[in-house]
Image (cartoon, helix red, strand yellow):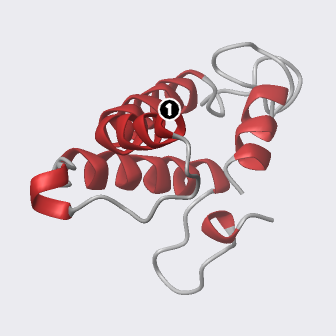
Amino acid sequence: MPPFTRPVSGRDHLSEHARLLRCVLGIRERSARAVPWEPDTVGVPTAGSSSALARINDVAFYANARDEVSALAGVCVDLLHLHAPADGDDHGGPHCRGCRLAWPCPTFTELCRLLA
């Protein structure tokens, strides 16, 4: 089980879905608050390659990573809002609110696996 979905003890006992959603919301919030990377303020990391093109690609990656992580976390949040356990039990057992498959649905299971 992924570390962020392990059951917690005490009063703050959340479902696996709620813990995963809280984790992804935290990632999105931290990435939005992070200071944008700039060579003048943070510096340029040590080169992994002597290739000038590889160096340019590294710098472009660092410069865009904050926004890309935030966007990816936003997609995960949207998927978790869509693929959540349904309130009612009108389909013969627990099911997903979005796809109506048995809960946990394949999408939620895959999100848990990928974010582990």
**SS of the residue under disc 1:** helix
The picture quadrant where one finds residue 87 is top right
Is 30 above or below relative to 69?
below
Q: In this view, does 112 lie to the left or right of 71?
A: right
Q: Which residue is the site of mark 1?
A: 53
Q: Give the residue drawn at x 61%, y 66%.
A: 4
Q: Position of residue 62 (x, y in %)?
A: 36, 45
Q: Where is residue 15 in the image (x, y as percent from the top left)?
A: 62, 57
Q: Give the residue drawn at x 10%, y 59%.
A: 41
Query: How crowded is the residue under tag 1: few (<14 C-alpha within 10 Å), some, or many (20+)?
Result: few
Q: Is residue 76 left or right of residue 1?
A: left
Quadrant in which the N terminus is drawn:
bottom right
Towards the viewer: 76 or 69: 69
Q: Where is residue 25 in the image (x, y as percent from the top left)?
A: 38, 47
Towards the viewer: 30 or 107: 30
Count all numbered tags in the image, as a single digit.
1
Q: Residue furthest bottom?
A: 10
Q: Give the residue drawn at x 55%, y 63%.
A: 14
Q: Residue furthest top?
A: 99
Quadrant in which the C terminus is drawn:
bottom right
Please state which amino acid type lies under the numbered disc 1: Leu
Towards the viewer: 5 or 8: 5
Q: Where is residue 26 in the image (x, y as percent from the top left)?
A: 36, 55
The picture quadrant where one finds residue 82 is top right
Q: Give the residue drawn at x 40%, y 30%.
A: 74
Is 3 above or below relative to 66?
below
Q: Residue furthest left?
A: 41
